[in-house]
Amino acid sequence: MNPLPQNPAAASGSFAAMKSGPYRLQFASYVLAMMADNIEHVISYWVVFQKFHSPALAGFAVLSHWLPFLLFSVAVGGLADRVDPRRIIQCGMLLFIVASSGWGFFFLTDTIQMWHAMLLLVIHGCAGVLWQTPNQLLLYDLVAPADLPSAVRLNAMARYLGILVGPAVGGIIMLTLGSSHGIIFNTLFYLPMLLWLFWAPVRDRSVAARRFAVRGFADIVLTIRAIATQPVLTAMTWLAGLTSFMIGNAYHAQMPGFAGDLGHGDPGVSYSVLLAADAAGAVLAAIALESWGRLKGTPRAAILLAMLWSLALLGFAVVRVYPVAIVLLFCAGFFELSFNTMAQALVQLNAPHDIRGRVVGLYNMAGLGMRAFSGITVGLFGAAIGIHWSLGLSAALLLALLVVLQRRATRPA
């Protein structure tokens, strides 16, 4: 691999994207939608875990959530190159509402079966793929090019704010409204994003008209060939794919099991605290990256941060002391947001203009779609050898692969 050049455009002022009024509205609605996404996860995972006690179903939750990203991210990115991304995002919001309403119906009637849960998990995954890539392209319409790195970092912070607030709000909702009415009430949090997009800024349609037609799965091969000669895009796509394939966020679906094994007080409270610790570390990372500005976005720095993330999760997998587990998850959240936002900003800033949606979609296919297989490495293997062993072995193997990727990144031309 050729030496990976630094991107001078990767730096921008502290919280620069917040100068844009439309971006501020997008940020607020994104936080609420991501919070609703995670409230649904918290309530549905908890109820389903209590009813079925199935690590395999938890693994399927990961598989069904991320497989649509693997299959359709590039196609959705190509579609967002040509048509209004706002309408694609709105379709995603509607599917989220359908999924939450479906959970509420089955919880109210106490008729939930395993195939019901599997179907709703698939609907939720399809909603996500219609949301994420078009939302990343929408940033180009909301901020100036120089402020794009800030917008990418802040959107990642919005994501983790939703993850941080979601468990707490979900717990309060379950205590006050119950799981059935609470998950129906959760649909209201998707409405701000759905409604705001009717007035969000629109891109230049004359530019979109010159872009290539959507070719389905052929777009994946064509996009891989298009970035093959660009080391920054290639390295960051590999980084996203490796981290997602080996671990992703599969350990989130197994968190009720980790909380029970750690045996610290009420399992429900322990579960929410562990999720919140992971999210809190990520939020602190976003604030630090925006405020400090000394950590420049380079491929080598992103790979190093990913290595630290794998070490933190390896420690979490083997530790049996609850306070230490909280600290390790906090560190994992810090490193995860740091390397993910750095890699995503490098991809968005270096993507060719005419196939930007496809390149971002390919990155999401690697970074989000490959998480489907982490449902196997962490989830299904967890059913066979235990969730601690499966996460620990996955983290150790990922660390070895990242060392190889780092050496290739530093190899002279």
Image (cartoon, rainbow, N blue to C red):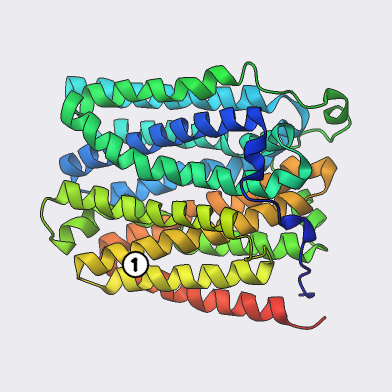
Camera-nearest residue between 399 and 119: 399
User: Does the rendering let one see residue 94?
Assistant: no
Q: Secondary structure at mark 1?
A: helix
Residue 291, horizontal then vertical, whole percent: 57, 55
Is residue 380 shown left or right of residue 262? right
Is residue 95 shown left or right of residue 349? left
Q: Quadrant of the N terminus?
A: bottom right
User: Does the rendering let one see residue 143?
Assistant: yes
Who's the residue at 40% across and 48% down the image?
62
The answer to whether 46 is drawn above or below residue 338 in the figure is: above
Who's the residue at 23% across and 37% down the image?
171
Camera-nearest residue between 5 and 247: 5
Q: Residues within 10 Å of mark 1 (few under 14, many from 20)?
A: many
Q: Toward which corner of the image does residue 284 lie, by quadrant?
A: bottom left
Residue 97, horizontal then vertical, whole percent: 42, 22
Q: Quadrant of the C terminus?
A: bottom right
The answer to whether 132 is drawn above or below residue 312 in the figure is: above
Who's the residue at 70% across and 45% down the image?
148
Residue 80, horizontal then vertical, whole percent: 71, 32
Residue 3, horizontal then vertical, whole percent: 78, 75
Camera-nearest residue between 47 and 35: 35
Furthest residue toward left: 265
Indicate the amino acid at tag 1.
Answer: Leu
Who's the residue at 22% across and 65% down the image?
323
The answer to whether 52 is drawn above or below residue 227 in the figure is: above
Q: How many marks?
A: 1
Is residue 335 shown left or right of residue 130? left
Residue topped by disc 1: 328
Q: Toward which corner of the image does residue 65 lie, by quadrant?
A: top left
